[in-house]
Image (cartoon, rainbow, N blue to C red):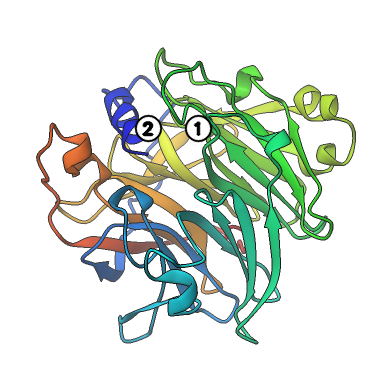
């Protein structure tokens, strides 16, 4: 994990030319919660509860928390599952909640998926991702939740050991049967555009479940593919991928009903938005903050993002810990309605 992020930082160099517009006034980035430990990815339940993974880079004792209305952080779903060396969760990084209130947790440590009902407070599903759809260097860090087809589509960036070339792919998992497939491996759209950069990373699905949007972390292009293409044979996915618009180097995305794709811009320390013609910075992070990470839509019409200063960790900063000791969950008003990516 440390090696992966060292390389991520090394490849996040000066901004290249993008098709950037400034037709909209910059939005205000609101701080929702502060953390004294680095958050990973957020998820907002349909009834407004805030779930946040704690980034595995720092080997936290507590792996996943709920942020209460008072700002308190408590282990989620339980201490037995989320706290300590013997906890059921090992290294969760991505969590997304469906319309029924089930939080789907992708654990890159266990290489499995847990479904936890946030209303009944009970485990409803546990799926082990089969070794046959993984690579020795698989890095399962984010996914799109397709509620229409009851499946998740994982972005497997690979490059987990930094000893092999990037061989990214989508890993499609049926949430009913647990059946999984690896598709579009090493497709050009999944590959980094910078030598030594990192591959397929940000991924989301639109509110109508028609398009899966994705890109390489170190890529300047945002792509999309019809969600229904995962229904057919493996070749359907690769043959159906199309270019959508420009983007900066980024770690997370989500999308609204109007096709605005919100992006955590790790180069500008900002939240940006792209459509099929241009990219612009929507809002900058609070002062002295860097590395916006995961994104999620809330039922309140806001886009939420974690901010964790990963670039300032000792592992990524020549052995010197330069973090402020205060990290953030922020939000910005969306341009149009959207509910996916919770």
Q: Is residue 186 above or below residue 183?
A: above
Residue at point 83% right, 29% down? Answer: 234
Q: Is residue 100 above or below residue 60?
A: below
Query: Which of marks 1 and 2 precedes in the sequence?
Result: 2
Q: Residues within 10 Å of mark 1 (few under 14, many from 20)?
A: some
Residue 29 percent across, percent down from the top left: 31, 60
Looking at this view, is 334 or 315 the one in front? 315
In what quadrant of the picture does the C terminus appear? bottom right
Residue 292 percent across, percent down from the top left: 34, 48
Q: Which mark is residue 4?
A: 2
Give the residue number, with chain letter if any, for mark 1.
Answer: 278
Q: Which mark is residue 108?
A: none
Helix, strand or loop at label 1? It is loop
In the rendered view, does 16 fall on the left or right side of 171?
A: left
Residue 80 percent across, percent down from the top left: 46, 77
In the rendered view, does 145 fall on the left or right side of 163?
A: right
Residue at point 58% right, 36% down? Answer: 156
Q: Is residue 102 visible?
A: no
Q: Is residue 182 visible?
A: yes
Residue 329 percent across, percent down from the top left: 33, 64
């Amino acid at each position: 994990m440390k090696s992966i992020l060292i390389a991520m930082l090394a490849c996040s160099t000066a901004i290249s030319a993008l098709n950037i517009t400034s037709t909209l006034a910059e939005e205000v980035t609101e701080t929702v919660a502060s953390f004294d430990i680095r958050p990973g990815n957020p998820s907002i339940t349909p009834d407004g509860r805030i779930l946040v993974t704690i980034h595995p880079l720092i080997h936290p004792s507590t792996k996943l928390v709920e942020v209460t209305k008072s700002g308190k952080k408590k282990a989620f779903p339980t201490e037995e599952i989320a706290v300590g060396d013997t906890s059921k969760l090992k290294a969760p990084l991505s969590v997304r909640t469906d319309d029924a209130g089930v939080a789907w947790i992708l654990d890159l440590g266990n290489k499995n998926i847990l479904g936890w009902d946030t209303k009944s407070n009970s485990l409803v599903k546990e799926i082990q991702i089969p070794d046959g759809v993984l690579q020795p260097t698989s890095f399962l860090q984010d996914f799109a939740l397709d509620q229409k087809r009851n499946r998740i589509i994982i972005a497997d960036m690979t490059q987990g050991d930094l000893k092999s070339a990037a061989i990214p792919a989508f890993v499609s998992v049926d949430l009913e049967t647990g059946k999984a497939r690896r598709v579009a491996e090493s497709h050009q759209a999944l590959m980094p555009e910078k030598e030594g950069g990192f591959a397929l990373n940000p991924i989301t699905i639109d509110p109508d479940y028609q398009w899966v949007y994705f890109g390489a972390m170190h890529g300047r292009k945002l792509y999309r593919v019809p969600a229904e293409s995962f229904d057919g044979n493996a070749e359907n996915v690769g043959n159906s991928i199309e270019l959508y618009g420009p983007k900066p180097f980024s770690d997370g995305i989500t999308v609204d009903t109007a096709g605005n794709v919100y992006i955590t811009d790790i180069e500008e320390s900002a939240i940006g938005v792209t459509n099929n013609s241009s990219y612009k910075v929507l809002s900058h992070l609070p002062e002295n903050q860097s590395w916006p990470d995961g994104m999620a839509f809330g039922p309140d019409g806001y886009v939420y993002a974690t901010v964790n200063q990963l670039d300032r960790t000792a592992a990524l900063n020549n052995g010197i810990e330069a973090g402020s000791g205060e990290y953030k969950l922020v939000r910005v008003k969306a341009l149009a309605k959207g509910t996916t990516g919770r």
